[in-house]
Amino acid sequence: FSLLLCPMAEDEDREDIQKQLFGTDTAQQTSFCSFFRSLPQSAEVVRFFSRKDSYYTVHGDNCEHIARQYIKSDRAVQLFGPKADPLPSCIVNAKLFTEIVSDLWKKARIEVWENQGRTWEVVKKASPGNVEDFEDIVMADGGSGEAAIVLAVKFHEEAGRQKFGCAYCNVTQRELGVAEFVDGDQYLNLESFFLQVGAKECLLPAPAKTSIAENDVIIDVLKRIGVVHSEVKRTDFVPRKEGWSAFSGLFRDGTVLNEECEMKDALGALGALANYLHLFDGDDNGQFSLKKVELNKYMRMDAAAIQALHLFPESTGPFEQTSNRQAGLSLFGLLNQCRTPMGSRTLKQWIAQPLMDLEEIN
């Protein structure tokens, strides 16, 4: 199968490989093509279909990007299915699959599908803020310089302004953080908070049927700063009856709850976050630190300011690569001579969170 990585592979060999993985049953191929095209299409979602012998197939527009960017050959794209309406497809071996996942998780959603007999079902998935199913790949060799951070937002109107209760989880560094603040109609505090934390994914309560557009302004902010969003059940954001004690098992020994106890909206957001990441189901007991984030402690910067100051390389789409030269033109690129991924992550956090207190700076 390694010949798929080589542009000199013979066409007849490619056809033999295609038959081995896809079979020769025309009706079955047509059924799969119809099924694939019935799935919601999004440039942010990359789907891998598990085949025999630890190989995967990618279909549609994504397979052309995979072929060019990772396989380095347009000839890896094969037409699969009925001749009247074939589906562009390519095959990925296990090693290349690992390389693609370790790169794509930072900027796209990843789904792995398996054939369960009569139907295909998702068996693994990852997003920029949740890499639980792929931790073995993402954290290999200490992980990359990026941290998997997902942030949940609960909001409501209070005295004519929006009040936000936020909770985030830095899965890579095992840190939970909470914050509450009010914001104006431009949501500048919310935007600044996302950039300070470095969140890559946002959880929002699914809008009520009577107010379908209630998340639209927040979604516009997220698009502006390159953060993907997921909508979860509104009931997940209802604070637990046990209050903060429901989460005490997640915190490291010695964690003291003081002002956090009064943060009811942040508590609700933390509950939604814990459900989404299955924090109560795994082996995460006693592994997390807890941090209360105060916005006035750091200089407030929006996306426009960060871009104008060239603090970080410009964010790109899932299949757009930032060249080494472009990365080096940013402040982070110039300063990042760190020898470990943890050092790179710490430097990025320092640049994103400029301190305002002179004593702390010194």
Image (cartoon, rainbow, N blue to C red):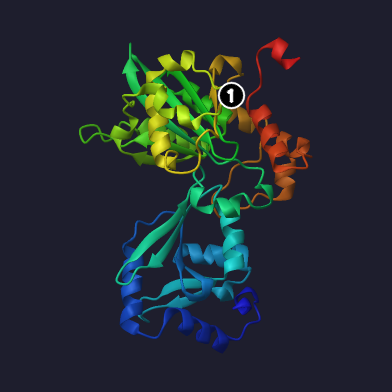
Quadrant in which the N terminus appears = bottom right
Residue extending farthest left? 210
Looking at the rendered structure, the kind of residue marked 1 is Met
Which quarter of the image is occupied by the C terminus? top right
Q: Is residue 189 left or right of residue 4?
A: left
Please report the residue visible at 57 percent of the width from the left and 76 percent of the height from the top: 75
Q: Is residue 298 left or right of residue 276?
A: right
Closer to the camera in the image, 202 or 280: 280
123 relative to 175, above or below: below
Residue 228 falls left or right of residue 40: right
Given residues 334 and 253, the one toward you in this image is 253
**In this orientation, does residue 185 appear?**
no
Query: In the rendered image, which residue does mark 1 sit on?
Result: 301
* Residue drawn at (26%, 36%) of the image: 212
In percent of width and height, residue 241 lies at 31, 24
Whether residue 233 appears in this view of the structure is: yes
Q: Is residue 158 left or right of residue 105?
A: left
Answer above or below: position of 155 versus 82. above
